[in-house]
Amino acid sequence: MSEELGSTAQGSMTASVATRVLGVVAAAAAALMLVLGLVVSPADVVQGEAVRLLYVHVPAIWVAYGSFGLTSLASALLLWRGRRRSDGGRHYDRLAGSAAECGVVFTAITLVSGSLWGKITWGTYWQWDARLTTTVLLFITYVGYLALRNLPAEPTVRARRAAVMALVSFVNVPIVHFSVDWWRTLHQPASLRIGRRPEITGEMYWTLLYSTLAVSVVAAWLMIHRYRVIRLEELRDEAGLAVALEQRRGEVVG
Amino acid sequence: MSEVASVVAGYGLAVVAVAVYGAWIVARGRSIGRELGIGDPGGPNGQEDGRWT
Amino acid sequence: MAAGSWGTVVWRDALLVAGKDLRIELRARVTITQVAPLGVLILVVFAFAFNANAVLLAQGAAGLYWVAVMFGAVLVIQRAFDVESDDGNQDALRLSGFHPGSIFLGKAMALAVQLLVLQTVLWVGLVVFFDVGVADWPLLGCAGLAGTSTIAVCGTLYGALAAGVSVRDTLLPLLLLPVLAPALLAGTRAFEAATGVTTDAGWNWTGLLFVMTAVYTVAGLAAFGPLVEDG
């Protein structure tokens, strides 16, 4: 860390050579994704131009699911092995936090692009359908998780509380999904299923796969940098504490 | 909204969201780094685990 | 110590914790004098919102009932953890040597009792103001108990998560209500069936509530260790 941060005096504090390269790749991949999604891929026979929203909507929710999965995994590792690590599991905590934030951003993108798409195909921004309802509850749950993370508290206490909440939320997702699924179902079935012939084919299929890859690279860049910023925040808090203690000692002596 | 306008709005909002979030991360990293004096090679960096960084 | 006696100890301690919480409530009477009237007030305010339309109110009665229970529950939960953070009480609990699982079960039981009191009052309000009748008493009773236990265990778990932080009052509902959303859905559907509004599969929804209770009880027992140690 010291080398990396030390060598980037004139650039971003959180960049290293590797992530600069990753950043360039991510930007290029995203640009190509826009070209493929908006220009190269064909309009759908049934859905017309609206189908282009698929290449934003579906990759965004997949990446969000992946991010929340990572949050849960890191939280489980924190509670399981955190105490045995020299940093008290702070590494896992940063990982969980950066992934959750990224997941919230991509869930928001999913919800917005989905409403726009819904307005075209269903004639309304919102339907009380199982997957939409689950997604909006998922979004609020992780917004709450981030709120819990941002509270002022002793860092290891906060990390453990956040980890417990992340795991409980993870348990909650299937319950929410099942219950709202039971309640009502309108949404078209999942776009791609592993081991089955996809319902969309050809250029649309490849564009969707490519877009997922591109969004994943962008998300990886965001997560790595957010992780480093969380580390910086911790350093700042520790430094602030050290300064305050120093001042206090000075007062006592003086 | 027309179909094309909705598609453009969907892509536009997604790009803006990611760009704003990314810019916020970088800006925050810079400002805290400056505050801590990390960035000048002789700065106090501590000996942290090198993972991910 | 044998597993059986260990279980007995956990239950005995849980009853002690529950008894302590209920004695505090009996002295202060916050649930009965403040939360229950607020619940009835929510029912009345909804009647204003729907312009006292009897048809709409009868249709929405089950949902309004559970919404009122849930908002009331948030207040009771906050109160249940307020008494712990006062005067270093949490340290006393930790030093008492109780198993964290006992504290979880005890607080959940005390919460369940208070929620049942709240629900009794709300039910009277529902019958009086919304003209609700009962088609299936066993279903109503079981769904009521299942919903109560779900809210009690979820509430205790999330109450502990948000306990002791400065903005708890605003944080707890934000954390708790999305988790309780399936319970709201299930309780509402089950009550609709029990009151004869729909012929929905009320027992299936009641079963879902019992499953939720089981899941969150296990989660709470596992999580309370790390949470209580924090302080």
Image: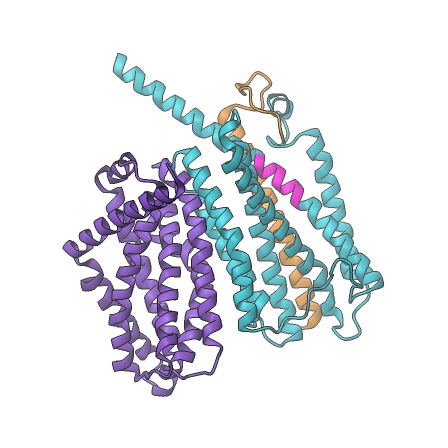
Question: Left or right: C84 with respect to C182?
Answer: left
Question: Left or right: A116 with respect to C52?
Answer: right
The image quadrant that residue C53 belongs to is bottom left
Give the vertical position of A159 relative to A128 (above or below): above
The image quadrant that residue C124 belongs to is bottom left
Of residues C113 and A200, which is closer to you in this image? Answer: C113
Bounds of the magenta segment: A219-227
**Residue at the spot 33% in from the left edge and 54% down from the top edge:** C108
Question: Left or right: A21 with respect to A156?
Answer: right
Quarter of the rendering occupied by the N terminus of chain A: top right
Quarter of the rendering occupied by the C terminus of chain A: top left
Q: In the image, which lettered chain appears cyan?
A: A
Question: How many marks overall?
Answer: 0
Q: Is residue A226 magenta?
A: yes
The image quadrant that residue A186 belongs to is bottom right
Q: Colour of chain B?
A: orange
| Place of residue C54 in the rendered image (x, y in percent of width and height, measured from the top left) | 34, 87
**Residue at the spot 27% in from the left edge and 60% down from the top edge:** C113
**Residue at the spot 75% in from the left edge and 41% down from the top edge:** A25
Q: Colour of chain C?
A: purple
Q: Is residue A103 visible?
A: yes
